[in-house]
Amino acid sequence: MTLLGFLRHLLFCAGLAMVSAVMVRAMISARVMDTPNARKAHANPTPKGGGVGIVVAFMLGIAVLYGTATFSRLADPYFRGVILAAGAIALVSFIDDIRDWPFAVKLAAQVLAACAAIGSGLWISVFRLPFIGPVDFGWFGVPLTLFWILFATNAMNFMDGLNGLAAGTSLVACLFLAFIAAQQEAWFVYFAALLLAAGLAGFLPFNFPRARIFMGDVGSQFCGFVLAVLGVAAARFSAVEQSFVLVPMLLSGVLYDVGFTLVRRAFAGDRLTEAHRGHLYQIAHRSGVDAKWVALVHWGFAAVGGMAAIAFIHAGPGMKPLLVLSVVLPQLGWTVLVVRRARHAQIGRW
């Protein structure tokens, strides 16, 4: 890619960021309100649905990409599958922001959207495992891919509880993913990650450090879903062994928090579908850590994951598993810190 080409891409993304910002301002005026309750961090009614700006910017950009940028296209079935699935998850989650559907309805919609992407052919069948090599899971790769998409989508949704946390983490992950994809000449992943980053860049100033509007499910579910699908596409980087771990490394802070919380609540006998304030980031905030710093810590996790992912690409086979494990170390340190603060603040059962 030439410098002039890269500058054109940045100019195009800057225009999309402006489109996103205009849509976010429109949603502020629409005043679809998020009312405070016992499990939410905000104290005053605040507009939600700001993720509409992210969705509009991404979908506009992907439409231009589909129609003009032939060198960055996926095969048509994959491309149409991404567009259809992303549009479906955005529509359903936007309606959910207005109507507040039960979790079972949201999950069913997510399954349908994920199936649209998988049905177009975007699923992983061959996993390259450390010390083993390529393992063909055959059709069992379909449920594995479905699980990954659903887990990443809901993980990002669960983490959207403090100003800037989910949006900023997604933005950092997108920028690293675009850089990595450009190195691999995986131009669809490169462009799609930049398009999502542009939408997030237009939204984030309205949400961090002070929130004039929240993303809502339309933003958090959409970001998680698109990043999960890009993770499937990235798994096909032919030049990178075990490339399916790249996006999980970028989202390590999000995935660890949700995974840790689910396991802890399961061992405690809690209902996993019941709303709660027991995520590590929520406990940190409840124990006195400023919301801004909690968000910045998670941006840092994404950056650490990004640097580890870049090192992973260039590492030898023996080092790759160690680099994957390295992204867990900051999470373990954060867990110890949060647990100690919770005890000091005398936060009871969480």
Image (cartoon, grey):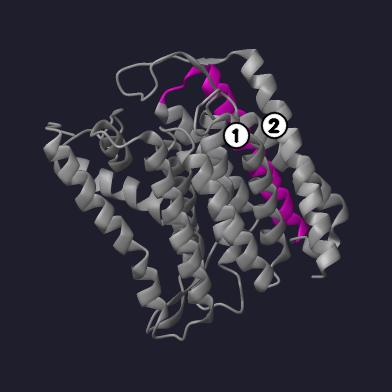
In the image, taking residue 290 as reference, residue 60 lies left or right, namely right
Give the residue number, with chain letter if any, for mark 2.
21
Badge 1 vs badge 2, beta-carbon distance below 8 Å: yes
Q: Is residue 254 above or below residue 186?
A: above
Residue at horizontal 37%, vertical 76%?
321
| Residue 306 on image: x %, y % | 50, 63
Q: Work out which quarter of the rendered image holds the N terminus and state it.
A: bottom right
| Residue 184 on image: x %, y % | 66, 73
Q: Nearer the viewer, residue 191 or 342?
A: 342
**Kind of residue indicated by mark 1:** Pro
- The local secondary structure at tag 1 comes to helix
**Kind of residue indicated by mark 2:** Ala
In the image, taking residue 107 as reference, residue 117 lies left or right, namely right
> Within 10 Å of the Cα at label 1, are there few (<14), some (14-19), or many (20+) other Cα atoms?
some
Q: Work out which quarter of the rendered image holds the C terminus and state it.
A: top left
Magenta segment boundaries in residue numbering? 75-102
* Membership of 98 in magenta stretch: yes
| Residue 131 on image: x %, y % | 37, 84
Q: Mark 1 or mark 2: name the one nearer the start of the chain.
A: 2
Q: Nearer the viewer, residue 312 or 102?
A: 312
In this rendering, the label closer to the viewer, 1 or 2: 1
Q: Which mark is residue 205?
A: 1
Magenta-highlighted stretch: main secondary structure?
helix
In the image, taking residue 4 as reference, residue 240 lies left or right, namely left
Judge whether residue 111 can be spotted in this image.
Answer: no
Residue at horizontal 77%, vertical 56%?
76
Residue at horizontal 58%, vertical 36%?
204
Q: Is residue 202 above or below residue 251?
A: above
Judge whether residue 191 can be spotted in this image.
Answer: yes
